[in-house]
Image (spheres, rainbow, N blue to C red):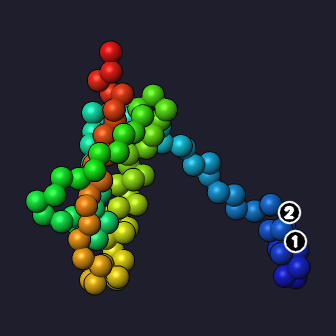
Amino acid sequence: MLMPLLLAGAMGWGCQAADKATTPKAPQDCSATYVACGCGCCGGVEPQVQCLSCANGDDLQALIEKDQEAKKDPQCAVAGCSVGTKYVYCDANAP
């Protein structure tokens, strides 16, 4: 009795998941900047500037998420501070 149900599930019959609508991605804010510090930035030190390209679709949000994850690392308790990296879209104000 259970075999027909297992077979039906394997063949894709029965409950089907509804199609998930893809949420359109918000337009990229090419004037945004972010200073990534990993475990923490050292005070009184200017961060290094790293250029991103808006035209090439560089994703600042992905860098922010990666930095936020780095802050959760248990090794941060003994890592000390670092020179931050300031991410900017260098082509945002280009002529």
Residue ID at (27%, 83%): 77
Work out whether residue 24 can be spotted.
yes
Which mark, residue 7?
1
Mark 1 near mark 2, Cβ–Cβ under 8 Å?
yes
x and y, in percent, of residue 19 in the image: 62, 48
Circle 1 SS class: helix
Callout 1: few (<14), some (14-19), or many (20+) C-alpha neighbours within 10 Å? few
Q: Residue furthest top?
A: 95
Residue ID at (83%, 75%): 6
52 relative position to 45: left or right: right
31 relative position to 58: left or right: left
Amino acid of disc 2: Met
Callout 2: few (<14), some (14-19), or many (20+) C-alpha neighbours within 10 Å? few
Which mark, residue 45?
none
x and y, in percent, of residue 58 in the image: 45, 40
Residue ID at (35%, 82%): 75
x and y, in percent, of residue 70 in the image: 36, 69
The C terminus lies in which quarter of the figure?
top left
Residue 53 lies in quadrant: top left
- What's the CA distance linking mark 1 and mark 2? 6 Å
Q: Is residue 73 above or below residue 24?
A: below
Which residue matches tag 2?
A: 11
Q: Nearer the viewer, residue 68 or 35?
A: 35
